[in-house]
Amino acid sequence: MGLWAAVKAERLGISTLLVDAGPLGQGASGGLLGALMPHTPDKWNDKKQFQFDALLSLEDEIIELEAETGLVCGYRRSGRLIPLPKPHLRKIALGHSADAEACWRRGDRRFHWHVLDRPPQNGWPDAAFAAAGLVHDTFAARVSPRSLVSALVTFLRSASNVRIVEGLEAEAIDPAASRIIFHGGGVVTFGHCIVSAGHRSFPLLQGISPPLKHPIGQPVKGQAALLKADIDPALPVIFLNGLYVVAHEGGHVAVGSTSEDVFDDPSSTDAQLEDVISRARALVPALAQAPVVERWAGLRPKAIDRDPMVGAHPEHTRVIALTGGFKVSFGIAHRLADAALNAVNGREPRLPASFTLANHLVVASR
């Protein structure tokens, strides 16, 4: 999210200092999975509309970024398959099909939530997991997280309005003096400060807020793996009971992920990932003997009510949050960055109310 905000600031001609505690883009966004999954199309609301618009516009954003940098981001609107192991799930899915026809549309573009009797390609997934059929969602997509991050970083390293400082971690915000205090004693003053430090954003923002009953957010550990297999990269993402199987270019398939509120080591992998890999091998027989080429773990920012946390602090309006979101933010980060920069420029952020920092502070105070 912070990288997108800096890219958008460069395009707007805003002088920007981009400070990262480590190398740019090496946090949770440097993972493996890259699944860009829409919410189900039923019970439509402003959150689902925001996500739909963002996921749709990401396609053009990536085309523009690739043209500017000469890099490829590994984006494909591949769709998604959701096996239906039980009959009652098929009935629910058929209802969602009509919802998608009504809601997943923009101009002459239409996206569907078809209910199929069997997998469109043998073994992707194993038909034994789809006793009642499966959903084929044509709106979902995938991207190579590292390739996208690399393109954003490449753009920023040649930007004229953005100065980059790596390896400098913020310790506290002093809103009265409009300054950031860094570990080691360094200080930077600001006109506006966008706080987009992943899960490390939460204590920074909580530190300038009134006493709250609950933390406004927490880190959640995720683990994923990359397998080497001769799989068509055009195949849809498979999703079943929290398990994702994502075909990428280069004969790679990403599988994941875990969601761990309690953990000892944020960067180590363990038996929970091995279970994910085993489940993926059972779901897709072609992965049964596929070697694991990388295991990955990282921390994602989960706000108190799971939604993104964006917008001006209600008591310190020059401090702007851009974090949270947990699982959905990667695919909508460009639009969240637009909202944060609207706050910088004194415009309406144009966000669902539940996405705002003010809302999260209210929830944490209860």
Image (cartoon, rainbow, N blue to C red):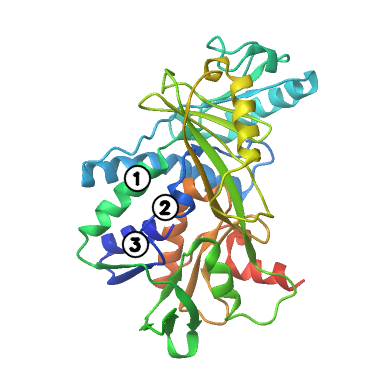
Residue on which disc 1 sits = 61
The quarter of the picture where residue 215 lies is bottom right
Q: Position of residue 337 (x, y in %)?
A: 43, 59
Secondary element under disc 1, as helix, strand or loop, is helix
Residue type highlighted by circle 2:
His
Secondary element under disc 2, as helix, strand or loop, is helix
Circles 3 and 1: CB distance less than 8 Å?
no
Q: Residue shown at 32%/48% (left/top)?
A: 150
134 left or right of 319 in image: right
Circles 2 and 1: CB distance less than 8 Å?
yes
Residue type highlighted by circle 3:
Ala
Residue on which disc 2 sits = 334
Query: Relative to 207, does residue 167 appear above or below in the rendering?
Result: above
Looking at marks 3 and 1 on the same chain, the residue that comes earlier in the sequence is marked by: 3
- Front: mark 2 or 3: 3
Looking at marks 2 and 3 on the same chain, the residue that comes earlier in the sequence is marked by: 3
